[in-house]
């Protein structure tokens, strides 16, 4: 038998297929109740921006992302990730601050959940004349219907340009455990 | 003069910590500019639009 089909009570079916490759492999299901995670229900995305946004001191400024590396479940749009699968997601973001001219300024990047500040990165002192990179990462629960995540930057002095000034500065994430 | 400068001119006692805790200034990068998203200062009243104009 190369495959096994499990039909639903009323509709639908799942086919379990064994690859046509020699050898014996074992897939063990855990002794626990839950949803089996496969690539089709484990969203992952990565995006970056080609444009900077202007940031006023002491103001949380949304970072815009216009280029996607990948977005496996089409959950990323308008610079926000909106989960359609409920569960626990890992997010990472790094942004750059440029135009730093005030000695003693500081900055950080934060993840917003549903329009409110939710998870801060490290609050770090800037160096005048340099470019400052700030990162944030963490896990948060998303309900799979309305919850969404955005990236905001904050700095304490002057007007600075913030964003992903190069394609290596990403906002990315993935589902690490279903609800 | 931006919104931060207007607020600190109106209320010189405001500190950086206030902008990280009881007051949230925000810009959604949608072309509408900076605005007060949250004002929970225990003693200072939220400025009116006229005061910020």
Image: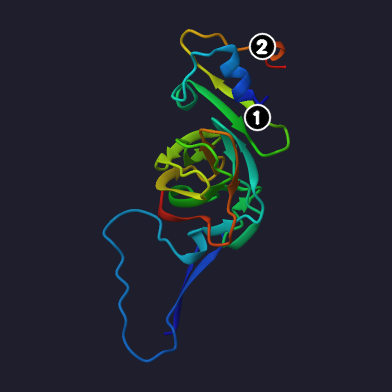
Residue ID at (36%, 54%): A34
Of mark 1 and mark 2, the one earlier in the sequence is: 1
Is residue A74 visible in the rendered image? The answer is: yes
Is residue A10 visible in the rendered image? The answer is: no
Residue ID at (41%, 89%): A21
Residue furthest to the bottom in view is A22
Element at badge 1? loop
x and y percentages locating residue A116 in the rendered image:
52, 32
Residue bearing mark 1: B34
Residue bearing mark 2: B48
Residue ID at (53%, 56%): A170
State yes or no: discs 1 and 2 in contact (Cβ < 8 Å). no
x and y percentages locating residue A78 in the rendered image:
66, 47
Tell me: residue A12, above or below residue A144. Answer: below
- A169 relative to A87 in the view: left or right: right
x and y percentages locating residue B48 in the rendered image:
66, 11
Q: Nearer the viewer, residue A144 or B50?
A: B50
Point out which mark residue A39 bears: none
């Amino acid at each position: 038998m190369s495959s096994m089909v499990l039909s639903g009570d009323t509709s639908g079916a799942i086919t379990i297929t064994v690859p046509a490759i020699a050898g014996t492999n074992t897939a063990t299901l855990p002794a626990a109740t839950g949803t089996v995670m496969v690539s089709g229900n484990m969203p992952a995305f990565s995006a970056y921006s080609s444009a900077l946004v202007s940031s006023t001191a002491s103001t949380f400024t949304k970072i815009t992302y216009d280029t996607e590396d990948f977005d496996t479940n089409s959950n990323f749009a308008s610079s926000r990730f909106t989960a359609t699968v409920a569960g626990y997601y890992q997010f990472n973001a790094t942004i750059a601050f440029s135009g730093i001219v005030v000695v003693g300024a500081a900055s950080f990047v934060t993840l917003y959940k549903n329009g409110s500040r939710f998870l801060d990165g490290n609050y770090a002192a800037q160096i005048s004349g340099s470019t400052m990179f700030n990162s944030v990462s963490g896990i948060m629960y998303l309900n799979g219907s309305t919850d969404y995540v955005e990236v905001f930057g904050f700095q304490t002095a002057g007007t600075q340009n913030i964003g992903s000034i190069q394609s290596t500065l990403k906002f990315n994430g993935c589902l690490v455990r279903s609800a | 003069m931006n919104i931060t400068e207007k607020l600190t001119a109106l209320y010189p006692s405001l500190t950086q910590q206030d902008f990280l805790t009881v007051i949230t200034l925000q810009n959604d990068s949608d072309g509408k500019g900076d605005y007060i998203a949250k004002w929970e200062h225990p003693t200072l009243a939220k400025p009116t639009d006229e005061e910020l104009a």
